[in-house]
Image (tube, helix red, strand yellow):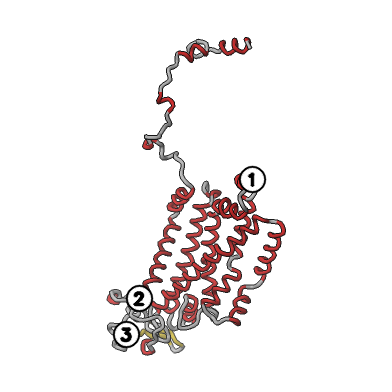
Amino acid sequence: MKKKEETKAAVLTPDMLPVDEYLKQIEFRDDDFEFQHRDGFEHIDTNFSSQSFWKESLARFKKNRGAVISLFFILFLVIMALVGPEMSPFRYDQQIIANQNMAPRVPGLEDLGILDGSETMRTSTGSRDVNYYEEYGMDDTYYWFGSDSLGRDLWSRTWIGTRISLYVAVLAVVIDLAFGLTYGLISGYFGGRVDMVMQRIVEVLNSIPYLVTVTLLLLIMKPGLMSITFALMFSGWLGMSRIARAEVLKLKEQEYVLASRTLGAGSFRIIFREILPNIIGPLITQTMFSIPHAIFTEAFLAFIGLGVPEPLASLGSLISSGYQNLTTHPYMIVFPLLVMGILMLGFNMLADGLREALDPKMRDM
């Protein structure tokens, strides 16, 4: 013991004094034991202060101009789908045979020679310029997107079709979260025989062609939104289930999951309270990518005649009808195709922006 005390006393301080004598000279004050920055938060360096995951993700999303612009376009289309049909004096199902095949005419632009109701018709005998508004004396009549072969307003029908596409988009999100997410989480967490049986079911459903599924549903049900809903519910959630299962397999052996299991937490509490919040980023990205696929599926079914029945319109059915009149009245396909393209491109760019903002692996790219 003497050797240890002699060694401790032999240690010299910067003042060349033994440690014991040096400590006696130090005077401690009450403010030496106060927490720093309790009252002076304004002195914290904001450049290096910690940020939450969602705050940092939002800042990264705002830097992506393409994603922000696409979000504004999607919001614009949503607003127009809600109020667009009410802006026209014609209903989407109103047929006026005398006003069939009217070219687009917009008030205020006709004086500039733009969308003034005139069109060039190309037939087998040649081409000629016509303006039915002037020929029929309809000076106070305006069809902003024109009218179809039955005299129905394409403006109202286009925005009604946009409603159908947005309904399918919301339906795809609900199906992904209600079926695909839950199915994938349970399959990946429990593993073993449970995972084997559940994945065999997924493989069987994935092996059935989608068009065959829809055709069989149409033999049982009438064409319409209900048949499209059941078709999406049948196989639209498979992609989400695979993503959720893969993420759970990576995280279920992590330390915080093992700690929760050791403390007695139940399986479903661990799945939905511990694992799910840590994989929400990839799941949101997958959900956004599934929306354009669902919209395209509905448009494809409507294009081949398996969509919503008349007089209800969807973008796919409008594009199909416009395709039949492409050579004589090309304006019939231009506006539905333009809205469909903006909608698809907007959701794809928004999904890319969310992936870059939420995926930690892409933050240094």
Q: Nearer the viewer, mark 1 or mark 3?
A: 1
Quarter the N terminus occupies: top right
Front residue of 16 and 89: 16
Q: Position of residue 328 (x, y in %)?
A: 44, 83
* Residue, far front: 264
Front one among 302 and 324? 302
Return the disc, 1 or 2, that comes first in the chain's sequence: 2
Residue occupying image coordinates x 38% and y 37%: 41
Q: Tag 3: Cα neighbours inside 10 Å, few (<14), some, or many (≥20)? A: many
| Residue hosting label 1 | 262
| Element on which disc 1 rests | helix
Foreground residue, 14 or 193?
193
Q: Position of residue 66 (x, y in %)?
A: 45, 58
Look at mark 2 in the image and give the residue it sits on.
Answer: 86
Residue type at numbered disc 1: Thr
**Camera-side mark, 3 or 2:** 2
Q: Circle 1: is it few (<14), some (14-19), or many (20+) Cα within 10 Å?
A: few
Q: Which residue is mark 3?
A: 133
Kind of residue at badge 2 = Glu
Amino acid type, label 3:
Tyr
